Image (cartoon, rainbow, N blue to C red):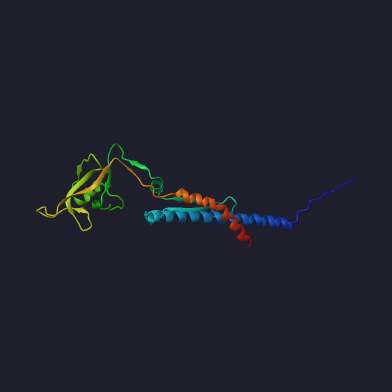
Amino acid sequence: MAMKLKLAIDPDIVALMAAEVAAGERAVTTAMREAGTGLKSAWRTQITGAGLGMRLANSIRSASFPKSGESLNAAALVWSNAPAIIGAHDTGPLIRSKNGFWLAIPTPAAGKSTRGGRITPGEWERRTGLRLRFIYRRRGPSLLVAEGRLNTKGRAVASKSKTGRGVVTAPIFLLVPQVKLQKRLDLARDAERAVDGVPGLIVANWVEGKL
């Protein structure tokens, strides 16, 4: 007695499997795009919430791969165009002076740099025409001070008085050997949440694509 077996593949089954693969590719690609965009938004919100400003927040960018088409191997990349600044606020590093010099931290009387950001002692002297004088303190930070008057904004400027009226000795810079930067961001927290949410996004998009 002989038995002959024959395997026949229903074209409908082949089409169904191909459609399922296509649905999976769409679901994974869409999920990764959403995860990347969501993480970018979360990081930007965290940066502005820490008071670091929109300019730094906008340095956070995202991209999805592949650039076109859909794939089960789709991926997303989120990064910052200002990694050094973002990294400093994310880790709270200890900043030490180089070559034994002091770190000069401007007081409100120093004002800001014309280039934006923190002003240096050299730039301050060139801008005001005043000379800074070093005052060593055994306890607490040493100082760079200047003799002048304080304007309405509390900044030290040259005095035009010939009698010396209104002239004060104002601390312009605090001098310290090192500074511990406060940790103001926790980017890993949002990244972990984004990774944990990817499976749910894939399932949601897969089911939605079949409805």
| Image position of 23 with respect to 85: above or below | below
Q: Residue furthest right?
A: 1
Q: Residue 200's spot in the image, x, y percent?
A: 57, 54
Give the x, y percent position of residue 98. Answer: 31, 38
Q: How many labels were placed on the picture?
A: 0
Is residue 200 in sight in this rendering? yes
Q: Is residue 174 left or right of residue 81?
A: left
Q: Residue at x 47, y 49 (%)?
A: 189
Q: Nearer the viewer, residue 27 or 207?
A: 207
Residue 15 screen position, x and y as percent? 70, 57
Taking 121 as reference, is 160 left or right?
A: left
Quick one: which residue is furthest to the left in this view? Answer: 163
**Residue 118 or residue 108, whichever sits in front:** 108
Q: Residue at x 49, y 50 (%)?
A: 191
In front here: 115 or 146? 146
Residue visible at 68% across and 55% down in the picture: 17
Q: Which residue appears farthest toward the bottom when viewing the image?
A: 211
Residue 202 to residue 98: above or below: below
User: Which part of the image, by quadrant, shows the C terminus?
Assistant: bottom right
Judged left or right of residue 30, residue 171 is left
Q: Residue furthest top?
A: 99
State whether residue 69 appears in this view.
Answer: no
Residue 24 pos. (x, y %)? 62, 55
